[in-house]
Image (cartoon, grey):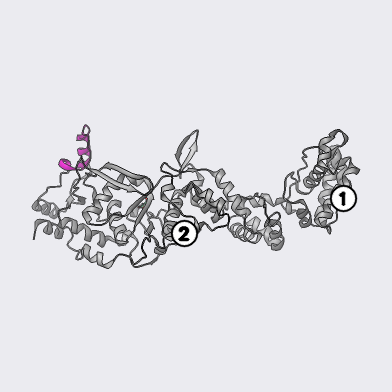
Amino acid sequence: MTDYEKLADLLFPQIDKDGTYYENKYPARNLKEGAKVTRFAPSPTGFLHFGNLYTMLVAYRTAKNSDGIFYVRVEDTDQKRKVEGAVEVMLKSLAAYGIEPDEGVIGENQEKGEYGPYRQSERKDIYQAFAKDLVKQGLAYPCFCTADELDEMRSRQENEPQKGYWGKWAKCRNLSLDEIQKKINDGAEWTLRLKSPGTPEGKCRFDDAIKGKIEMPENIQDVVLLKSDGIPTYHFAHAIDDHLMRTTHVIRGDEWISSTPIHLQLFRVLGFKPPKYVHVATIMKEENGGKRKLSKRKDPEAAVTYYSQQGYPKDSVNEYILTLANSNFEDWRRANQTAPLEEFPLNFKKMSVSGALFDIVKLTDVSKNVISKMNAQKVFDLSYQWAKEYNTDLAALYEHNKDRAKAILNIDRENKKPRKDIAKWSDIPDYISYMYDETFTPCYDLTGNATPSLAVKVLEKYIDTVNLNDSKDEWFGRIKDMCEAVGCTPNVKEYKANPENYDGHVGDVSTIIRVALTGRTNTPDLYAITELLGENTVKQRLEAALNHYKEEM
Ligand code: GLU
């Protein structure tokens, strides 16, 4: 038995399995050629950043577009940061955008799949088996340095070009078996470090699927693999887990690029084939002419929950994320107006290298478009579901008469050029407020040629002529017919040619009626509104407006 083998037994007496055992236990996946295996590997904090959703939508689509697997692995090695129920919350947030894992952690206490356990806290024996193998080969060693000793080392390195625990600074690298034995007998705590094979001149080269070819100095640090409690660091767990779970594409935030030389070195010493790295640039936000990261602390829209609270439909958010992800998405959308998003061929090479810019105005536009294409039933169903959770007043309004609510939402919808008034469900209460007496607030401000004195004439006439049994043409015919009697022309062109001959035109007459009925100068189809308001309300509002303008004159 070599000293390394003896050391391995000394450090890990309880570990009776080795890497080969786990290699056999988790064989290569039986998937079709080209299928990609991607994953979401959250630390269970319960907070899902918009950037996570963005990255995970890319990961999910990458797996789905190739008939691969998307799984969830919970990185809960930091027990101090553990938050009860966090996993459930994060999974729910993903599910709200259609991201349903094929495998892995699928609920607070639920797992599915052959490559588990999928919680790092339950994989201690696996990490230690590989750690033991490394020690046996002389590729890892116990380090007994205390925090004070490490601080002291750092202060002595002040003028060194290469800092850290490496080469000659790595005090515990060459301890003899006897020395180690003695320290352990004395009850000294130890961490396990990699004996890095890197050299200061060495280079690490890899081809990132988004960023392209990258060259960095290779890793020379004897990084910690296991902490003193035997729990792995992110680096070690990443290598073991992504290898054993047979991840083909590690899709993660680009804050990990600087650690990638460590990771590639670990794959090498462990004898694993490295995955393809796909480093997604952080979502940025414009501020004072500059750019900064979309921040959990400063920006409410950084939290994925913001979008559900505001009532952005999942289709809008997903569509917007694709505009952020691939610059050619909008061209594709124009050419494929009704195609489901799943058909878009997402391409890593077209992703921003420096960080896509988050733009709420753009999200609003995208969402208005998406909602304008929904039928009234869908708008009703989704907004009702939202209202029950976030706006019970709206839910109550709907419940007065659901068919009427649907009819209101159907105004100027399901036609060739639907209006684009609604960007999110929380816009609806205001959008439909004048359709309900409970929420109608009159406002008698007029625009154009409409004046209070013209309004009095128009309303006096209209109260007598309006007939809720009219067809749309008859209704508009009556409005046109009224024009002359109130000193206006039914013909806008005619008005423009000789404005001095008239007090206004049919548009001004309509404005007066619109303002009286809705309190607004711009609304969807006034005929449909009139019908849905019903005879009593129409008469009441016309009278009230008439009284108002009479007083104002
Ligand atoms: N747990 C890591 C994080 O939340 C995962 C990074 C990765 O995807 O590998 O940042």
Q: Amino acid at mark 2?
A: Ile
Q: Position of residue 33 (x, y in %)?
A: 36, 63
The three-letter amino acid code for the residue at tag 1 is Ile
Q: Residue at x 28, y 42 (%)?
A: 216
Residue positioned most to the right: 485
Instruction: Point out the image quarter for the N terminus.
Output: bottom left
Above or below, comparing residue 352 to residue 346 in the picture: above
* Residue 195 in view here: yes
| Disc 1 crowd, CA 10 A, few/some/many (<14, 14-19, 20+) | some
Magenta-span inclusion, residue 475: no
Q: Which residues are magenta?
A: 149-169
Q: Secondary structure at mark 1?
A: helix
Q: Residue 461 at x, y = what percent?
A: 89, 47
Q: Is residue 280 left or right of residue 15?
A: right
Q: Residue at x 85, y 47 (%)?
A: 480
Q: Return the residue at label 1.
A: 463
